[in-house]
Structures are given as structure tokens and as C-alpha cells.
Amino acid sequence: MTWYYNRKVKSTFVHHTTQWAWAEIDGLGWRRIKDGAADGVTNMFVMMCAARANERLVHVDVDASNLIVTAYMI
């Protein structure tokens, strides 16, 4: 896993299924939010949307499969 700090969320996208959500992170491109817990995916997607809407930066942890596993809005 690799942490990327102080990144801007450029855009977000969600599919109609419960666990398919993506965020475009500055310098990383599109990364899917790791599935496995529907509420966890929803919460992280809402946080990414809030970061985008309010021009806040995020710290993201990306695993070897290029999935976002942890994120913090700063």
C-alpha cells in the first residue's frame, strides 16, 4: 500500500450498483474505491464528493491493485 498526500479530487463517478465508485485523484488518475462493505464505499464516496465540492485536499492509501482503501479529507 502506498500513501499519497495532499491530493485534489478532480472528479467522482458512481455506478448504480452499491459498491462501484471511483474518484479521479490529481496525479493518480481514476481509482476505484475498494469494495467489500457497502456502507464503507458509500461513506468514502460521499467524502470524495465533499472534497471535490469544497476544494479540500485528501490523503489516499492505494493498494497494489490500485484501489483506494483509506482516505482522509484535510
Image (tube, rainbow, N blue to C red):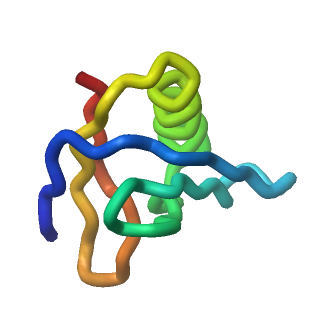
Q: Quadrant of the C terminus?
A: top left
Q: Quadrant of the N terminus?
A: bottom left
- How far across and how far down the image is residue 42, in percent? 60, 37
- Name the residue located 22 percent from the left edge and 56 percent from the top edge: 61
Q: Which of 8 and 66 is in front in this view?
A: 8
Q: Which of 1 and 38 is in front in this view?
A: 1
Is 38 positioned to the left or the right of 61 in the image?
Answer: right
Is 67 positioned to the left or the right of 43 in the image?
Answer: left
Does residue 9 lie above or below 16 as drawn? above
Farthest right residue in view: 16
- How far across and how far down the image is residue 55, in percent? 44, 24
Q: Which of 10 and 59 is in front in this view?
A: 10
Does residue 68 lie above or below 46 as drawn? below
Does residue 2 lie above or below 33 as drawn? below
Tally the numbered discs: 0
- How far across and how far down the image is residue 48, in percent? 49, 36
Q: Which of 70 and 6 is in front in this view?
A: 6
- Name the residue located 49 percent from the left edge and 17 percent from the top edge: 54
- How far across and how far down the image is residue 27, in percent? 32, 64
Farthest bottom residue in view: 65
Farthest top residue in view: 54
- Name the residue located 13 percent from the left edge and 67 percent from the top edge: 2
Is 70 positioned to the left or the right of 2 in the image?
Answer: right
